[in-house]
């Protein structure tokens, strides 16, 4: 999906190699909310805005908040809506694109199963 690729000419394009070298981790997960820490987002407002825009466009994602001070990313989502194949595929694709160091099998289990 082309809209998950960083925009050509973006001042701070996010590359998979850059994210693989940096620490990216799930800080908290509960049904309907996931908080990540992604150090490459610190001090990168253009990149934060891009990440917010991409994730907000995904069906079932209710909100996205990115802090360029801490590198924190908070996703709010509708657990029932995100289980649809289309929404799940879009979310998985975006997560892999922007946060490839995440353990996607673990994330998929949480999203599909809905941890409490």
Image (tube, rainbow, N blue to C red):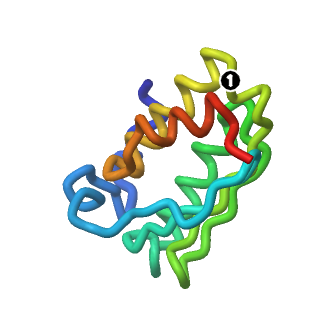
The residue under the point 41% across, 49% down is 98
User: Residue 47: where, in percent of width, then height?
Assistant: 47, 62
How many C-alpha atoms fall within 10 Å of the one at disc 1: few (<14), some, or many (≥20)?
Answer: some
* Residue 40, horizontal then vertical, whole percent: 37, 70
Q: With 114 as the anchor, is 49 left or right in this view? A: left
**Residue ranking furthest to the bottom:** 69
Identify the residue at horizontal 40%, vertical 74% (top origin): 39
As drawn, is 22 to the left or to the right of 96? Answer: left
Q: Residue at x 49, y 69 (%)?
A: 37
Q: Residue at x 61, y 17 (%)?
A: 86
Which quarter of the picture shows residue 57?
top right
Q: Nearer the viewer, residue 83 or 60?
A: 83
Residue occupying the far top of the picture: 85
Kindly indicate the quadrant of the structure image that contains residue 105.
top left
For this rendering, which residue is in front, 49 or 110? 110
Residue denoted by label 1 = 83
Q: Disc 1 on helix, strand or loop?
A: loop
Would residue 56 be found to the left or right of residue 5 on screen?
right
The x, y position of residue 26, in whole percent, is 50, 60
Looking at the rendered image, the quarter that the N terminus falls into is top left
Q: Position of residue 110 (x, y in %)?
A: 59, 39
- Relative to residue 70, is residue 84 depicted above or below? above
Q: Is residue 102 left or right of residue 59?
A: left
The residue closer to the viewer here, 89 or 80, is 80
User: Which residue of the protein is positioned furthest toward the front in this rendering?
Assistant: 116
- Determine which quarter of the picture holds residue 97: top left
Query: In the image shown, does 24 or 116 lie closer to the viewer?
Result: 116
């Amino acid at each position: 999906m082309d809209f998950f690729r960083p925009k050509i000419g973006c001042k701070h394009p996010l590359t998979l190699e850059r994210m693989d070298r940096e620490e990216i981790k799930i800080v908290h997960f509960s049904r309907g909310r996931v908080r990540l820490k992604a150090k490459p987002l610190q001090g990168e407002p253009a990149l934060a805005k891009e990440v917010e825009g991409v994730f907000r466009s995904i069906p079932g994602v209710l909100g996205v908040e990115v802090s360029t001070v801490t590198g924190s990313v908070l996703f709010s989502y509708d657990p029932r809506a995100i289980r649809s194949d289309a929404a799940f595929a879009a979310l998985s694709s975006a997560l892999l694109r922007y946060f490839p160091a995440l353990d996607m099998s673990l994330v998929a289990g949480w999203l599909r199963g809905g941890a409490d």
